[in-house]
Image (tube, rainbow, N blue to C red):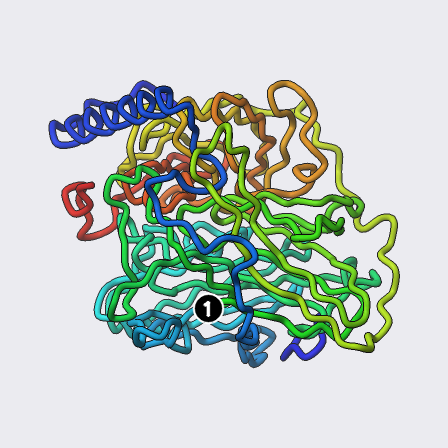
Amino acid sequence: MLDSTPGPPPPPPAVPVRRRRRGLIAALVAVGLVAVLVVGGAAVWFGAGASRPTPPPAGAASFDRPLRIPELAESIVRDGVRVFELEAGAGRTSFVPQGDTPTLGYDGAYLGPTLVAARGERVRVRVQNGLDVSTTVHWHGMHLPAAMDGGPHSPIPAGASWTPEWTIDQPAASLWYHPHLHGRTREQVDAGLAGMFLVTDDAEASLPLPRTYGVDDVPLIVQDRSFGADGGFAGGPGMQFDGALGDTILVNGTVTPHLAVSTERVRLRLLNGSSARMYDFVFADGREFSLIGTDGGLLAAPVRTTSVPLSPGERAEIVVELSPGEDAVLRSRAPDPALHAGAAAFDVLQLRAAASLAPSPELPETLVPLPAADDADAAAQRTFVMSGHSINERQMDLGRADFVTEVDTTEVWTVRNENPLPHSFHVHDTQFRVLTVDGGPPPRRLSGWKDTIALEWNREYRLLVTFEDYADPTTPYMYHCHLLWHEDQGMMGQFLVVEPGQQPDLRRPEGDTDDDHDH
């Protein structure tokens, strides 16, 4: 346990005229983008094109503000259930000298507290919507019943509350929570609605890993934002194709942050909380560090590396060694300039080691056992092609189940990104394994449990996806691009998990129509 915690496709149906027009526009936009990229000799991957705002050059950051550490969420155990309360509300936050920024947050003005619960615990979260618009809360990376997942089928009206309850049944991992309102996800996440949810278990607790929250075990929610002359958030997707890219980096809501380090090793729980920007995290001095965990938990063994790329929604746990009195700058490095015109490196966080550091135990050579990723018993093979703002040439329809599968089965999903737009792929409820990348074994950093993966152009990813425990013929799970503007534009599908012989009975959420979310 963490120290200081309160407790342990069938043929597509006919497409309405409005949606056909939208699809045609998206296709024309994608074709235009391809032409621009081919002529310019550039592709979009980690970072922004020359016409977009970029952060100050690496090395220019002052690191003059102490890193804010999100508070641990309070909870009580009532009748054997760990109970949390969250309230989404509006506030104002001081980021830049121009003035305070109107923001959204949970239990505060910006972002939210860190929830911690142990594997095997029953948890209940009462979510109060203090906004003047509907929202949802999605537990990203969590294995739980579809009705508790917090997707677009579970809107919370303004002034209302929602109380999901489930049993934590997955390995220790760094998860997170954020809104998932159909067509409105990006604006609410970008305004500040996000937070971490840490799962603990006995296997992780038995390892000699840094785990004192806020001291040597630190969550880092990394986001990019731009600000207007009045201090308000500025910029929108416009014609940027992949969403808004900011020129200022926030870490836990802090601009140019530093972290005082008092131990020889520090564990950083990295979350790409941006809505569009891809990061490739390195240290400015090129030092190696240990990657110990990805989206769904610890790896089988630490991976020594000098970089960790993360797309929106992905997480990574790394352990960094420091010497007394030294500084180490966490940076997102520039992509290859031959492929990414105008992109730049930028600084994220400075670690400041004290003159005297408390000793930390050596990292173990092995972490946790991982089952072999075996597709021999796969019940189905499915293909998902990402293009423009569509998946398999379809856009999201809340009244349509794109496929139905049976509980306690495993499938192989082949996912491809067929145009140079950056895309990622996120699946709700399940933690998948990467079987192959372009027919070969995945890199070691992709060998563990994943729920989100960056899709490089024209590469094929085969995923082993398992649907365990929960069946519901009426409420679906989602799969989608986690670049949030793409998601809002309809780059999302949904599936039902049913018992053998059970008939699906998907219903569109009350009051929702396709025209309500015309993109």
Q: Is residue 264 left or right of residue 278?
A: right
Q: Is residue 93 left or right of residue 337?
A: left
- Quadrant, the N terminus: bottom right
- Can the viewer see residue 90? no
Which of 314 and 54 lies nearest the eye of the viewer?
54
- Answer with the quarter of the image where residue 208 lies: bottom right
Judge whether 58 appears above or below 29 on screen: below
Which of 345 and 104 lies nearest the eye of the viewer?
345
Name the residue that disc number 1 marks: 253
Q: Residue at x 63, y 51 (%)?
A: 316
- Quadrant, the C terminus: top left
Q: Residue at x 33, y 51 (%)?
A: 152
Tell me the SS state at disc 1.
Answer: loop
Of all residues shown, which one is farthest toward the left?
17
Label 1: how many Cα within 10 Å (few below 14, some 14–19, many 20+): many
- Can the viewer see residue 21? yes
Where's residue 5, x and y in %? 65, 77
Q: Residue at x 69, y 70 (%)?
A: 352
Q: Amino acid at mark 1?
A: Gly
Judge whether 383 appears above or below 134 on screen: above
Where's residue 89, x and y in %? 32, 74
- Answer with the quarter of the image where residue 100 lies: bottom left
